[in-house]
Image: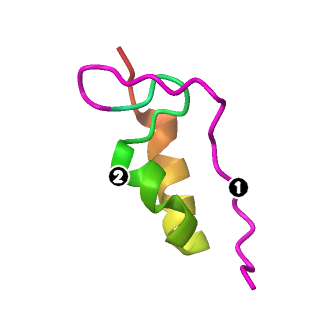
Amino acid sequence: MNNQTIKTPCVDICKYNKQNFCVGCKRSSDEISGWINYSDEMRQAIMQDLKNRKID
């Protein structure tokens, strides 16, 4: 059973910019595909990074 509590930041806008970041949630394709297997600590680190990630 999965006890992880940090949910995906997905907002159902799945388009990528030139830097290969999703313009909706700001995650990279690797972060999106790996999200289900990440620990809460890894998810929290990504969520912190997203706050400062610029999407053009």
Residue located farthest toward the bottom when viewing the structure as drawn: 1
Per the image, the residue denoted by label 1 is 7
Q: Residue 10 location in percent, x, y?
A: 62, 38
> What residue do we see at 56% from left, 65% from top?
36
Q: Residue 51 location in percent, x, y?
A: 52, 37
Residue 10 magenta-drawn? yes
Give the position of the C terminus as an image quadrant: top left
Residue 27 magenta-drawn? no
Q: Secondary structure at mark 1?
A: loop
Give the position of the N terminus as an image quadrant: bottom right
Amino acid carrying label 2: it is: Asp
Q: How many marks?
A: 2
In the figure, residue 39 lies in which quadrant?
bottom right
> What residue do we see at 64% from left, 50% from top?
8
The colour mode here is rainbow
Closer to us: mark 1 or mark 2? 2
Mark earlier in primary sequence (1, 2)? 1
| Residues shaded magenta | 1-20
Q: Is residue 1 left or right of residue 22?
A: right
Q: Residue 16 location in percent, x, y?
A: 37, 24
Look at the picture and state if 55 lies above or below 38: above
Label 1 crowding class (10 Å Cα cut-off): few <14, some 14-19, many 20+?
Answer: few
Amino acid carrying label 1: it is: Lys
Q: Residue 21 location in percent, x, y?
A: 36, 32
Alpha carbon separation for disc pair 1 and 2: 16 Å
Per the image, the residue denoted by label 2 is 30
Q: Mark 1 near mark 2, Cβ–Cβ under 8 Å?
A: no
In the figure, residue 9 lies in which quadrant?
top right
In the figure, residue 40 lies in which quadrant?
bottom right
